[in-house]
Amino acid sequence: MLPHERSLVEKLEGRPFAIVGVNSDKPERLKELVADGTTTWRNFTNQQEFGKISTAWGVRGWPTLYLIDHNGVIKHKGLRGDAMEKAIMEMVAEAEKVQK
């Protein structure tokens, strides 16, 4: 999934789109992923598999993806591949309408 996410970051540069990672890996592993360029977006650490963030959001498996719109509303959960990209493009277009 990470190559697809990196391509979305590049494709949507300058548009109202962002990826925010919440990672259950050890902080050292997260630092490695950022340092080697595997992830190029902001990441937070959950500190443990069932930490505060994953518990509050009901995460039961990794990765769990949430698509959140420009109003902060969760629009989709668990989409992958083409379905995820289509939903993101629709959400970005909607956010751009609001910006005008």
Image: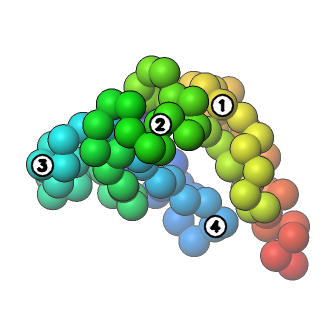
Q: Secondary structure at mark 1?
A: strand
Q: Amino acid at mark 3?
A: Glu
Question: Mark 4 near mark 3, Cβ–Cβ under 8 Å?
Answer: no
Q: Secondary structure at mark 3?
A: helix
Q: Residue at x 44, y 44 (%)?
A: 52
Give the number of the mark in front: 2 or 1.
2
Q: Amino acid at mark 1?
A: Lys
Give the number of the mark in front: 4 or 1.
1
The residue at which mark 3 appears reads as 28
Q: Earlier in the sequence, mark 3 or mark 1?
A: 3
The residue at which mark 2 appears reads as 54
Residue 77: mark in rendering: 1
Q: Amino acid at mark 4?
A: Arg
Disc 1 crowd rating (10 Å Cα; few below 14, some 14-19, many 20+) is few
Give the number of the mark in front: 4 or 3.
3
Q: Earlier in the sequence, mark 3 or mark 2?
A: 3
The residue at which mark 4 appears reads as 15
Rendered-image quadrant of the C terminus: bottom right
Rendered-image quadrant of the N terminus: top left
Q: Residue at x 63, y 27 (%)?
A: 79
Q: What's the distance in space between the residues labelled 2 and 1, CA to CA?
A: 14 Å
Q: What's the distance in space between the residues labelled 3 and 1, CA to CA?
A: 28 Å
Q: What's the distance in space between the residues labelled 4 and 1, CA to CA?
A: 22 Å
Residue 93 appears left or right of 43? right
Q: Earlier in the sequence, mark 2 or mark 4?
A: 4
Give the number of the mark in front: 2 or 4.
2
Q: Residue at x 73, y 44 (%)?
A: 74
**Residue 98 percent location from the top left of the image:** 87, 70
Let me know if residue 78 appears in the view. Answer: yes
